[in-house]
Image (cartoon, rainbow, N blue to C red):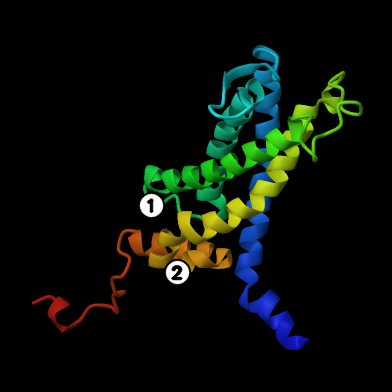
């Protein structure tokens, strides 16, 4: 039992801290995602209207797919910036775009999975569709699209965390091991600022030497 405790909470303490920070950022991203979804839904056509048919199937790309994707892009950018500056602390170690494109790729992969799940939750012929009787779209809290989107976020977020930790921010942490443990970041940044200060790294003068004496 003691070994298990050490393994989970001592050796992998930094992973729990990263997960906690990622979860906090993710929670704020959920709010951004849903708020964006509410806005575009109110401004756009009816979310269940078809846009274009999917070739070779009886399905259509509907407006709720477009709304969900737009909300994802806004929340993805929000989450990336917070994760870059706070969760993984890599903003001063890597170029913005070099980290954003794999973060976006991971997000898009999750969004594809999310759109499939969203379709299953919204389509009335699906075995897991949300009840249109209970969620009859009469109020905001009874809007099927909002609850379906929330379920998608809950399912996709853990997958995104694992992929982003192992890929998106991994290269920077490989070259800067101090970033692997958030508890060491502040010390590392402080040490770096000390070394970059004027006169840093120069030995303190011990007083006038032989050659400093006046002739």
Above or below residue 84? Residue 35 is above
Residue ranking furthest to the front:
56
Q: Position of residue 209 (x, y in %)?
A: 20, 81
x, y (%) of residue 146?
76, 30
On screen, residue 151 versus residue 190, left or right, reads: right
**Where 25 sits versus 189, above or below?**
above
Secondary-structure class at tag 1: loop
Relative vertical location of residue 164 with respect to residue 42 in this rendering, above or below: below
The percent position of residue 157, horizontal first and vertical second, equals 65, 49
Q: Residue at x 35, y 59 (%)?
A: 197
The residue lying at 67 percent from left, 16 percent from top is 49
Query: Which quarter of the rendering shows the C terminus?
Result: bottom left
Above/below status of 30 relative to 122: below
Which disc is residue 172 wearing?
Answer: none
Q: Tell me which residue sits at (91%, 26%) in the image.
A: 133
Observer-nearest residue: 75 or 180? 75
User: Could you say whether the residue bearing mark 2 is in a helix, strand or loop?
Assistant: helix
> What is the quadrant of residue 142 in the picture?
top right
Given residues 92 and 102, the one toward you in this image is: 102
Residue 177's disc is: 2
Mark 1 vs mark 2, CA separation in Å:
14 Å
């Amino acid at each position: 039992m003691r070994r298990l405790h050490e393994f989970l909470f001592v050796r992998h303490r930094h992973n729990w801290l990263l997960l906690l920070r990622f979860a906090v950022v993710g929670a704020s991203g959920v709010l951004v995602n849903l708020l964006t979804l509410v806005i575009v839904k109110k401004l756009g056509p009816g979310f269940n209207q078809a846009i274009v048919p999917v070739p070779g199937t009886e399905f259509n790309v509907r407006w709720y797919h477009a709304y969900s994707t737009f909300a994802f892009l806004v929340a993805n950018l929000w989450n990336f910036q917070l994760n870059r500056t706070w969760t993984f602390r890599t903003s001063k170690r890597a170029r913005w775009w070099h980290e954003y494109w794999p973060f976006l790729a991971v997000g898009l992969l999750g969004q594809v999975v999310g759109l499939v799940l969203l379709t299953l939750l919204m389509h009335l012929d699906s075995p897991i569709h949300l009840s249109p009787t209970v969620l009859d779209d009469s109020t905001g809290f009874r809007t099927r699209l909002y609850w379906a989107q929330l379920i998608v976020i809950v399912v996709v977020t853990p997958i995104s965390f694992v992929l982003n930790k192992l890929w998106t921010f991994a290269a920077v942490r490989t070259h800067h091991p101090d970033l692997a443990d958030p508890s060491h970041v502040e010390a590392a940044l402080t040490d770096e600022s000390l070394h970059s200060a004027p006169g840093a790294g120069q030995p303190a003068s011990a007083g006038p030497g032989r050659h400093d004496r006046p002739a």
